[in-house]
């Protein structure tokens, strides 16, 4: 057995005795902490933790010489961020479109003239699985250094059966190669290929009759996604795809209400989606529907910020009692960053979440939104030892406040320093 003991932790953050599946409404303001703490990891799991004042070597006798110790004086320990929505497997960056956006074109304008997702789909055809994996591994390394310990990755730049499978093969390879916990989502319905414009139901037929069965047969996806929004897939398309997914045991996580009151939230909840994501256009009716559902409301601050969109009413949703998660949406078009510390800052600066609410949104609620809340998202006995040790920082509030710089010093994934 391998043991790792972290001592003299200034503050151990987000500890739980009885782990919750999520934090909703007022609970989001609570982040339990232990000042001057120790934490013991056994193999890849959190074994125990407590106050330094109560620490004695007698309550801790690992029957092994394989004990590593870390002195975390002046530093805090957080559970890793759980980034529940990304598109970080992609063939190439798209900074030229970003310049077009600066000059005034909208996300939809760019999509209409074959840019955006379709641009990535064109590049996908010239890219091999190995090239996809190489590019994505670099980005995974980067997000690990910023404190992410679990990430969801979507397909959706293939838009063709073979190309979609290619993306999913790349994600499967990343699961093997990376120390991160990874969930994969099939997003064949990300955009309508140019040749199906005006007859998109035919493309939806391919998603349903060709793609989903193959994806399921090879066990390539944990979840299924649809971009249900104005100019993309309709509620009817979405409903058909979600039903087909459920037939193969694929629960949904959908893109909804980014561009309009699209009905995406309602259809997601109707099919018991694990999460509905984006949510810029969320009104009272949508909030009512989300209450009493098992669906996580997931907001993607990076995309709203980068595209200059309106901001989802996060404050109102939390005040209405909902759980809210926040994720990076790391992708080459609308959010070319996977830095979850920046998401913490945006959560408080742009959405008026307190630092504690932001931490819950990026840890336990993100874990729920990718179906791993029993394993990750907080510091609890038996959970996976994915966590980070900060640099010397004065307070928890300093994390969102000191925005833009990396406050993470040491990352531990699966109980090992990476
Ligand atoms: O989540 N909204 C749809 N899809 C992505 C954008 C992907 C892209 O532009 O490449 C998003 O923002
Ligand atoms: Fe997205």
Image (spheres, rainbow, N blue to C red):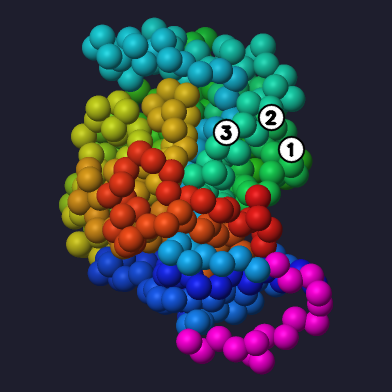
- Residue under label 1, please give it: 173
- Residue under label 3, please give it: 139
Does residue 266 appear in the picture of this structure?
A: no
Q: CA distance from mark 3 to mark 1?
A: 14 Å
User: Callout 2 environment at 10 Å: few (<14), some (14 to 19), or many (20+)?
Assistant: many
Does residue 308 appear in the picture of this structure?
A: yes
The disc at residue 246 is: none
Q: Nearer the viewer, residue 377 or 224?
A: 377
At a point 62% along the width and 17% down the height, the residue shown is 124
At a point 40% along the width and 30% down the height, the residue shown is 335
Write down the quadrant of residue 255 in the picture.
top left
**How many marks overall?**
3
Q: Percent from the top left, x then y, of residue 287? A: 24, 54
The disc, 2 or 3, on the residue closer to the chain's N-terminal end is 2
Inspect the magenta stretch and tell me whether residue 52 lies in it: no
Q: Nearer the viewer, residue 122 or 3?
A: 3
Q: Secondary structure at mark 2?
A: helix
Q: CA distance from mark 2 to mark 3?
A: 10 Å
Q: Which residues are magenta?
A: 53-68
The disc at residue 133 is: 2
Q: Marks 2 and 1: in contact by CB < 8 Å? A: yes
Q: Percent from the top left, x then y, of residue 319? A: 20, 62
Q: Nearer the viewer, residue 236 or 17?
A: 17
Q: Secondary structure at mark 3?
A: helix
Write down the quadrant of residue 110 in the picture.
top left
Inspect the magenta stretch and tell me whether residue 67 lies in it: yes
Q: Is mark 1 within 8 Å of ligand 1?
A: no
Q: Percent from the top left, x then y, of residue 147? A: 51, 49
The disc, 3 or 1, on the residue closer to the chain's N-terminal end is 3
């Amino acid at each position: 057995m391998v043991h790792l003991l972290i001592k003299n932790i200034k503050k151990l953050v987000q500890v739980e005795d009885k782990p919750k599946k999520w934090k909703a409404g007022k609970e989001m303001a609570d982040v339990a902490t232990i000042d001057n703490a120790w934490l013991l990891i056994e193999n890849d799991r959190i074994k125990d933790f407590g106050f330094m004042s109560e620490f004695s070597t007698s309550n801790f006798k690992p029957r092994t010489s394989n004990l590593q110790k870390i002195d975390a004086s002046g530093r805090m320990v957080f559970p890793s961020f759980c980034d529940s929505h990304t598109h970080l497997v992609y063939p190439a960056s798209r900074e030229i479109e970003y310049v077009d956006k600066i000059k005034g074109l909208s996300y939809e304008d760019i999509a209409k003239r074959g840019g955006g997702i379709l641009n990535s789909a064109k590049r996908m055809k010239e890219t091999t699985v190995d090239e996809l994996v190489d590019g994505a591994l670099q980005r995974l390394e980067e997000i690990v250094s910023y404190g992410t310990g679990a990430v969801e990755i979507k397909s959706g730049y293939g838009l063709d059966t073979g190309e979609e499978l290619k993306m999913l093969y790349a994600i499967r390879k990343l699961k093997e190669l990376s120390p991160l916990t990874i969930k994969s989502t099939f997003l064949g319905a990300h955009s309508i290929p140019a040749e199906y414009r005006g007859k998109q139901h035919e493309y939806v037929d391919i998603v349903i009759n060709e793609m989903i069965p193959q994806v399921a047969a090879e066990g390539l996806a944990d979840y299924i996604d649809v971009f249900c929004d104005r100019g993309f897939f309709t509620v009817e398309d979405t409903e058909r795809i979600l039903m087909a997914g459920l037939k193969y045991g694929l629960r949904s996580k959908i893109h909804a209400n980014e561009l309009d009151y699209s009905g995406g939230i309602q259809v997601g909840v109707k099919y018991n989606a694990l999460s509905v994501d984006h949510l810029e256009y969320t009104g009272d009716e949508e909030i009512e529907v989300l209450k009493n559902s098992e669906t996580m409301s997931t907001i993607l601050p990076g995309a709203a910020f980068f595209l200059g969109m309106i901001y989802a009413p996060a404050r109102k949703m939390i005040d209405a009692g909902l759980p809210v998660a926040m994720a990076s949406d790391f992708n080459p078009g609308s959010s070319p960053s996977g830095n979850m510390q920046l998401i913490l800052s945006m959560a408080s600066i742009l959405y008026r979440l307190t630092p504690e609410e932001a931490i819950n949104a990026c840890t336990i609620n993100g874990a729920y939104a990718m179906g791993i809340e029993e394993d990750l998202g907080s510091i609890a006995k038996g959970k996976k030892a994915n966590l980070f040790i900060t640099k010397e920082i004065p307070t928890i509030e300093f994390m969102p406040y000191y925005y833009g710089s990396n406050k993470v010093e040491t990352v531990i994934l699966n109980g090992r320093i990476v």
